[in-house]
Image (cartoon, rainbow, N blue to C red):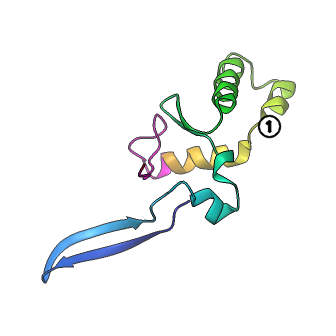
Amino acid sequence: MPDSQLVVLFLNGEYLGAYLLIENIEKSFTETNYLIPSNNVPMIKEGQLEEGPQEELDNFIFFGKTYSKKDVSDDKVYEEINNVIDVDSMIEHFGLGIYIATSDWPQRNERSMEK
């Protein structure tokens, strides 16, 4: 997660409001903050690969198509899913998105990245 800070903006003594100042996410963000090489982190936006290996997009699409048709209440299927994604983390992610009423979630996901 990028670092952020709530700030109050005054310009020439005039109050302009409260803003959330967010760290800019650059290509080196994952490497700098998580020690994961940037080329190992695929960026997929609206179903299109922005950066990273094509194989990761193919895996992402295959996973979605395959498991969206399966019965996840089946213990074997659920175990297969757990071998690919961190389900607890995903539950927390979805729960937070619902709780804070993220306006573009889950279709897009907010991010700030300049190319």
The residue depicted at 13 percent of the width and 84 percent of the height is 13
Instruction: Tell which of 98 and 58 is nearer to you.
Output: 58
Instruction: Tell which of 29 and 85 is nearer to you.
Output: 29
Image location (x, y in percent) of residue 39: 65, 47
The residue depicted at 16 percent of the width and 76 percent of the height is 15
The extreme right residue here reads 76
Query: What segment is highlighted magenta in the picture?
Result: 98-114
Disc 1, SS:
helix
Image location (x, y in percent) of residue 52: 62, 39
Task: Tally the marks.
Answer: 1
Instruction: Tell which of 99 and 83 is nearer to you.
Output: 83
Instruction: Tell which of 59 and 50 is nearer to you.
Output: 50
Residue 36 lies in the magenta-colored region? no
Q: Is residue 114 above or below residue 20?
A: above
Which residue position is annotated with label 1?
A: 82
Q: Is residue 114 above or below residue 63?
A: below
Image location (x, y in percent) of residue 73: 77, 26
User: Residue 19 vs residue 57: left or right?
Assistant: left
Residue 103 lies in the magenta-colored region? yes
